[in-house]
Image (tube, grey):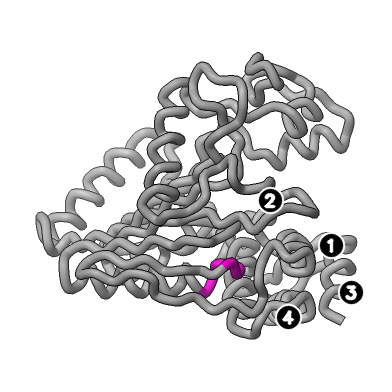
Amino acid sequence: MKKKRDELLQLARNALEKAGANPVMAENAALHLVRAEEHGLPTHGMSRVPFYCGFLKNGRADGAARPTMASDKAAVCLIDNRDGLPYESSAWAIEEVIQRARRNGIGFAGITNSAHVGVLGIHLLPVAAAGMVGVAFTNSPAAIPAWGGRKALFGTDPVAFAFPRKKGDPLVIDLALTTVVRGKIMLAMQKGEKIPEGWALDRNGKPTTDPKEAIENGSLFPIGGAKGAMLALSFELICAALTGSAIGTEADSFFSDKGNKPKIGHAFLAIDPGALAGHDRYLERVETVVTTMLADEGVRLPGARRFLSEKKLRAEGIEIADELLKKIEALAA
């Protein structure tokens, strides 16, 4: 069934508040989830409303929490999310990095005591709108083994970049460090299907085509083999060591009904081109790259599909599966 943006925002807000989220937390989370739907990313959109409601009801997130500033020094700050849903914290972090980059040329904000943070690329859009380059990292519950190891240690540890352009939408690069998202493996398990080799490892660190073994006992294969595992290590240290947060093995799976508060970390960075080559030179160089890319037939700019989807769905409405809609309506009632 198709729903307008405002209808979905209201539904998501009501459901999250009923589950225990304070109004500011519910509002920020709802805005992000509906934006994910608009960007054509339903796996991180309204389907997360029941997921977050479960987090709140099971005590894995504190619905009363409001973030606080834990550390503040020049271009850098650390925000304590205090175990809430991290959308208010993330919006605050983005405001901080933009203001600090305006003063210092660069701004860095870490977030600690956090949880699932949604689509990193969406968080960075205000940075690009401010004419700055944005970078975002997060760690997550263990999914990838250290290279040569058997047990999951690092999270899928996504990374995102946003590069503003002189005209048009920014370039948005947004990816996790696994060859496939865990949701596809879970879907194969529900359907009783095998998964392709190269997606996951079993409990012994060997490639497996059994989705149940991959989810319950195994781990996910990193992109690029050893190189991907080294990136996962790097992002884990940025998000956990710099912010003092939990590492992947200390956070129970997001998909578990029962578990601890994840207490993972995120990091956001804004870089002002005016402090380096200058805005005009930066924008000219970006357009040179873009023009060269598009001269090769078949190339698509990263993020382009998201912005096309957003324009279309804002005009036409967002299609939500009837079963999911009924579930959210029941949570919001």
Kindly report the distance in space between the C-alpha atoms of the residues bearing marks 2 and 4: 20 Å
Left or right? Give the position of 233 relative to 176.
Answer: left
Which residue is depicted at the point 55% across and 20% down? 149
- Between 330 and 80, which is closer to the camera in this rendering? 80
Comes first in the chain, label 1 or label 2: 2
User: Is label 4 in a helix, a strand or a loop?
Assistant: helix
- The quarter holding residue 170 reads bottom left
Measure the alpha-carbon separation of dots 3 and 2.
22 Å
Front position among marks 1 and 2: 2
Q: Nearer the viewer, mark 3 or mark 2?
A: 2
Q: CA distance from mark 1 to mark 2?
A: 19 Å
Q: Amino acid at mark 2?
A: Phe
Of labels 2 and 4, earlier in sequence is 4
Identify which residue, 107 or 163, lies in the foreground.
107
Mark 3 or mark 4: whose residue is earlier in sequence: 4
Q: Are marks 3 and 4 in contact (CB under 8 Å)?
A: no
Can you tell which quarter of the image residue 209 is in?
Answer: top right
Q: Which comes before the other along the chain, label 1 or label 4?
A: 4
Left or right of 75? Residue 301 is right
Main secondary structure of the magenta stretch? loop
Total tally of numbered discs in the picture: 4
Residue placed under numbered mark 4 in the picture: 17
The CA span between labels 3 and 4 is: 13 Å
Residue, x 64% and y 69% (percent of image)?
34
Q: Position of residue 217 (x, y in %)?
A: 74, 28
Residue located beneath label 2 in the image = 254
What is the secondary structure assignment of the residue under circle 1? helix
Q: Is residue 7 visible?
A: no
